Structures are given as C-alpha cells and as structure tokens.
C-alpha cells in the first residue's frame, strides 16, 4: 500500500482504478488546530495522458498499479491495427493508432522496442531517442530564404513519416530522426 507520505515525482499509483504518474507533490499542514495535513499532487493519467491536480488527506492509502514492461517487435499495419510480436510469450498484440498516439508515426517493420502494459493493454511505447530511416522521396528545395534559420525541404521516409530535412540531404540517404519531436537529427554516414 502506498500512502500520501510516499508521494514523490515519478511514483506510479492507482487512483480510481487508473494508473497515474506523479509529476509534483506538496504536503501542506493547515494552521487550524485539529486539521489534518493535505497532500497536493499533479499527476498524469497513463491511459489518457491527461494531467490533473488533486488533493488528498494524509490518511488515504493507494494501491500500486500492476504495470509490466515487455519487449516487442513491430510487425505490420493491417489498415486498422498495429501488430506487434511479444518477444517473451510470442503472441501477437494488436493496437490502434488512436491508442498509440503520436508514437505510431515512428514505427517501421522489424523495430524492436519495449512497451509498458496495464491489464494486458499497451499504455505506452518506449521508443529509442533516435531512429534511423531511409529517405524514399524528397521534394526539391529552394535556396534563398536563410533569414529564418536553416533552409529545409520536406522528405518522406521508408515508413511514410514526413520530416523537414536540410537542402543537402538527398533521396536514398539514411538519416536519424528524434522521436522526442519528430525532427531531423543527423545524416547517417
């Protein structure tokens, strides 16, 4: 059992049946006599991604969520579901793009990664900081507008991901893309 005195940044806790990660925690002791201390937290729902502020009495207790981290390999997209192979049980796991959110755009066949599961469903993917892609199509760039920083042009990767790349990058080259913001990081040599 987790008590409010255990609350700290990064702790995962079960609130109303949903898993949350605590982002901030403050304990307040009211000045009135006989008033109980309060724990104020800012937490993110791991299912929905929503962030909220909530206050609890220090006497409240919470369960720890049953989260499991498992290695997966991305297999394919069947127009409705992303299909993964659980590398421990060798079972196929199917997830919609809506459940994966922005992470779905970085997937490509054969990608190995880890995922966080809650009650048998994927909560989030743990993507590497950078992934390598081959450029299959690049639009011609126009030189000149350098007043606003580096000049870029749109490029399409081998998985369909579109990224702005510098003018010197050409079709057929391999690049690394940051999974944090989806931007060009560097050319692979």
Image: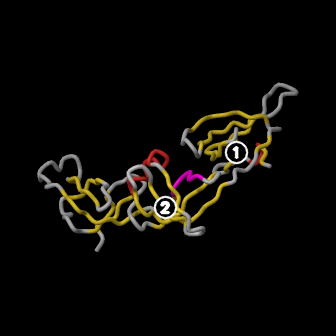
Between marks 1 and 2 in the image, the one whose residue lies nearer the viewer: 2
- Percent coordinates x, y for residue 158 in the rendering: 29, 62
What residue is rendered at 29% in x and 53% in y?
162
Q: How packed is label 1: few (under 14 Cα within 10 Å), some, or many (20 or more)? A: some
Task: State left or right for residue 27 relative to residue 177.
Answer: right
Q: Label 1 vs label 2: CA separation?
A: 27 Å
Q: According to the image, label 2 marks what residue?
A: 84
Task: State left or right for residue 3 relative to residue 112.
Answer: right
Task: State left or right for residue 161 relative to residue 94.
Answer: left
Of residues 31 and 157, the one drawn nearer to the viewer in this rendering: 157
- Percent coordinates x, y for residue 155 in the rendering: 23, 56
Q: Earlier in the sequence, mark 1 or mark 2?
A: 1
Task: State left or right for residue 6 relative to residue 100.
Answer: right
Q: Main secondary structure of the magenta part?
A: strand
- Percent coordinates x, y for residue 160 in the rendering: 30, 56
- Percent coordinates x, y for residue 143 in the rendering: 12, 53
Of residues 53 and 18, the one drawn nearer to the viewer in this rendering: 18
Of residues 114 and 78, the one drawn nearer to the viewer in this rendering: 78
Residue 124: in magenta span: yes
Q: How packed is label 2: few (under 14 Cα within 10 Å), some, or many (20 or more)? A: many
What residue is rendered at 61% in x and 45% in y?
23
Disc 2 on helix, strand or loop? strand
Residue lying at the far bottom in this picture: please name it.
189
What residue is rendered at 88% in x and 27% in y?
34
Disc 1 on helix, strand or loop? strand
Q: Please provide the residue range marked out in magenta.
A: 121-125
Q: Are marks 1 and 2 in contact (CB under 8 Å)?
A: no
Q: According to the image, label 1 marks what residue?
A: 14
């Amino acid at each position: 059992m987790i008590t409010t005195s255990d609350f700290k940044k990064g702790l995962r806790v079960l609130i109303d049946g949903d898993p949350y990660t605590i982002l901030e925690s403050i304990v307040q002791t009211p000045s009135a006599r006989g008033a109980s201390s309060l724990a104020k937290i800012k937490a993110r729902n791991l299912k929905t991604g929503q962030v909220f502020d909530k206050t609890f009495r220090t006497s409240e207790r919470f369960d720890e969520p049953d989260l499991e981290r498992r290695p997966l390999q991305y297999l394919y997209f069947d127009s409705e579901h992303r299909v993964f192979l659980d590398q421990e049980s060798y079972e196929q796991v199917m997830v919609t793009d809506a459940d994966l959110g922005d992470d779905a755009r970085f997937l490509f066949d054969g990608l190995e990664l880890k995922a966080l599961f809650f009650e048998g469903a994927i909560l989030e993917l743990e993507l590497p900081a950078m992934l390598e892609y081959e450029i299959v199509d690049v639009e011609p760039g126009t030189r000149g507008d350098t007043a606003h920083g580096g000049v870029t042009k749109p490029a399409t990767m081998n998985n369909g991901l579109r990224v702005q790349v510098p003018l010197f990058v050409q079709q057929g080259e391999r690049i690394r893309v940051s999974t944090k913001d989806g931007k060009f990081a560097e050319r692979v040599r």
